[in-house]
Image (cartoon, helix red, strand yellow):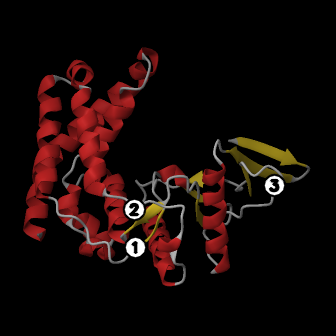
Amino acid sequence: MWKWQIGPHTYSLKKYERHDDAAKIRFIHEQLKSIGADYIVAVEPYPDALVIQQPWIDSGRKVKFSQSNDRIKSLSLLHQLHATNKKIAWHKSIYFHEIDLIRKWTHRLEKWQQLEPFLNQKLGPSKTQRITELAKASLDQLRPIRSNNLTLLHGDIVHHNFVSDKKDRLYIIDFDLACLGPPEVELILWSHRVLPHFDYDLQALIQEHPSLRKIDWNYLLFPNELMREWLYASTLSDLQLRGFLPKLKVFTDKALKHMPQLWDDCGRKS
């Protein structure tokens, strides 16, 4: 990714290794542009088919899931994106695979167990085992989400993929991991991202976002954020870990403290 300035105009350029990957991004933007979607950043013509050029967003402020207004706006944007299947036949495209969240998380658990020596050393055997038990117990009670309403999912709803310009208009960027799936899948993943900012209080989350009532709350019990962050930690150098681990351990302790209440709350909602 490069930031490129030509006179008064500034652009972002991203070069892909495969033509299909760049073509996928162009296809998504062309389809969304055709229905007047105003929450994407235009893809501009470029002589190299492997390069995606887009205008640089002034301000470029990333959303903060700790802020209510940012949560509300980002979730509203996802609802708009998911509703595009009413006008665009995403399921007929050659570019997308269908996400299987149970399979994805089962694979994540397998990777987690392979890294137990690292986790036992950095996290501790007791907490490592506790997270493993939570993951297994959660997966055992999950039921597949019905695939009768497939649509485009962004696929990577981390906070920095929601960007506001100087007029506070929100855009969603970086569709590299876009895939097909029921909207519920991405709402579940978004809920995982924001729940820590509610101290894992399910009722508070629902009160702020009533549209989330329809998701299967059992999917919130998988310790997805914990496992994802610790698996990321396993890729860091010792120097990087020294700065990252203290914050991750605080995050982990907070999550494990609130998990029993979350399990109780989800059980009552089921």
Report the front residue among 176 and 240. Answer: 176
Tag 2, which secondary structure?
A: loop
Q: Quadrant of residue 102?
A: bottom left
Residue found at the far top of this picture:
238
Residue 154 location (% of width, % of height):
48, 61
Residue under label 3, please give it. 46
At 21% from the left edge and 67% from the top edge, which residue is drawn?
216
Element at badge 1? loop
Location of residue 189 (image quadrant): bottom left
Give whichever of discs 2 and 3 has the lower sequence position. Answer: 3
Q: Residue 211: tell me if it is visible.
A: yes
Q: Is residue 120 above or below residue 71?
A: above
As drawn, the label of residue 150 is 1
Q: Which residue is mark 2?
A: 98
- How many numbered callouts? 3
Instruction: Relative to 227, say whether 90 is above or below.
Output: below
- Is there CB contact under 8 Å for labels 2 and 1? yes
* Distance from Cα at disc 2 to Cα at disc 1: 8 Å
